[in-house]
Amino acid sequence: MHRRHFSTATALTALSYSRVLGANDRAQLGYIGLGNRGDQVHDGFLEWGDARTAAICDLKSSYLDLAEKKAKDHGHDTPKRYADWRKLIEDKSLDAVVIATPDHWHALQMIAACDAGKDVYCEKPLSLTVFEGRRMVEAAERNKRVVQVGIHRRSAKFLQEAAAYVQSGALGKITLAQGWHLTNEWPTGLGAAPEGPPPSEAEWDAWLGPAPKVPYNRNRMYYNFRWFYNYSGGQVTNFGVHYVDMLRWCLGKDAPKAVTVMGGKYAIDDNREIPDTLQAMWDYDGVMMVFTQINANAAPGNALKTEMMIRGTKGTMYLNLDRWEVVPEVITELPLPQRTPVDRNLEKGYNPSKKPVLEARKSTGYPTAQPHARNFLDCIKSRAKCNCDVLTGHLSTSATLIANIAYKTRSYLEWDARAEKFTNNAAANQLLHYKYRPPWKLA
């Protein structure tokens, strides 16, 4: 497969591409987890004729049935079906594994896939703990594997342009970068589902995997797992990792120096564990980054009703899933007047002297799974670094994970990014990982 073929990839449908390529030119992909996000990622790869759905794995047969149908509808042969993800990873016919399982499974599956010589597309957040994330980075490096983390905004051209604009310094000195996850789930939320016997004890045990064994509750399984800490970092990692990554990318920053969080379950009466109201603040070495999660009120967080905002001395960038916009500041080089009742004329010329210092700008687009899948497929061939490689995903995920630790410990935590340890709270360091339930072990 020559690179010139990839240069026209985005202009070809899956059907037309399959006519150009022979079967041996297609990346043989195995999918682990085909629920809500796994199905969306699968759709992203199905757009490309040089990717074949060769194997699928999930605990729910209905998810497998749908994935198989979609693969056949795109001209693929019937994929192999696996009930055990370890068997899929052992399949020597596969070139790469796509992981879209709950967060607590990512590390075990990704490391096993890398050790088996597979390239990996792993959904975000990369890991459930900081320790897992570092081991995932090491596994990719040790095995020289191509890894794409599913923070798909990194492959959206219009957002690449936004990041380049901010990095150019056009906004001036940036002091605040903020993201919001706003929705109103009050009053019912998830509902207060009762504990009870699972429909299948074997399925419940297989779903839990390394997580602690607890009584079955339907709110803990499948999509609703994001509201429980044993399996997810909640909305701080679910939505927050998108915003932290985008803002960190724009700022050109790797890791924070400190983090603190306040919040709680203030309004919604259900059996979730994560807060319905929370605000996290990171010190990114001279820039304050803020993530605000409000799940009991959906009013916009800023004047332009966007998910993110970057405030600089020369202007503000507002970023949304489908657009970004720069609003100039008006400034003056006159010194701030000392107000005095004796002479009000001293202050009258100050505001009229202010002028815009940059041009307003706008851009639109929409980040989908398709370009991110395309980038991964290209990198499988070229062995280049993906748009959201494993270290990039780890840095963005780690920031959100240490925010959760700050919330749980009710503390201001100073972070040594090189050692990946807190320097001022020994108890907080104990939460950087957890003990897996036997027989599961991190390789």
Image: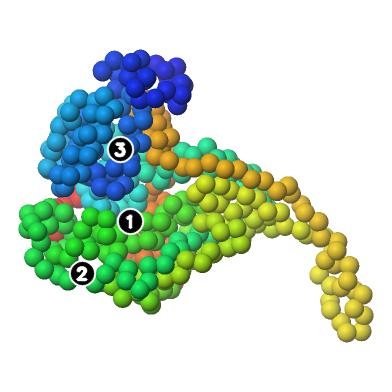
Eyeballing the image, is 410 above or below 214? below
Q: Secondary structure at mark 3?
A: helix
Which of pointers 3 and 1 lies earlier in the amino acid sequence?
A: 3
Which of pointers 3 and 2 lies earlier in the amino acid sequence?
A: 3
What amino acid is labelled 2 in the image? Answer: Ala
Q: Residues within 10 Å of mark 1 (few under 14, many from 20)?
A: many
Residue 194: x %, y % from top left: 17, 71
Residue 182: x %, y % from top left: 46, 63
Which of pointers 2 and 1 lies earlier in the amino acid sequence?
A: 1
Q: Residue at the bottom extreme? A: 341
- Based on the displayed image, in which of its 4 quarters is residue 175 positioned? bottom right
Residue in view at x 54 percent, y 56 percent: 306
**CA–CA distance in space, label 2 to label 1:** 31 Å
Residue in view at x 18 percent, y 40 percent: 64
Residue in view at x 84 percent, y 79 percent: 339
Mark 3 or 2, closer to the camera: 2
What amino acid is labelled 1 in the image? Answer: Val
Q: Residues within 10 Å of mark 3 (few under 14, many from 20)?
A: many
Eyeballing the image, is 14 above or below 338? above
**CA–CA distance in space, label 3 to label 1:** 27 Å
Give me the disc on residue 61.
none
- Based on the displayed image, in which of its 4 quarters is residue 99 positioned? top left
Mark 3 or 1, closer to the camera: 3
Q: Name the foreground residue: 90 vs 217.
A: 217
Q: Name the foreground residue: 232 vs 404.
A: 232
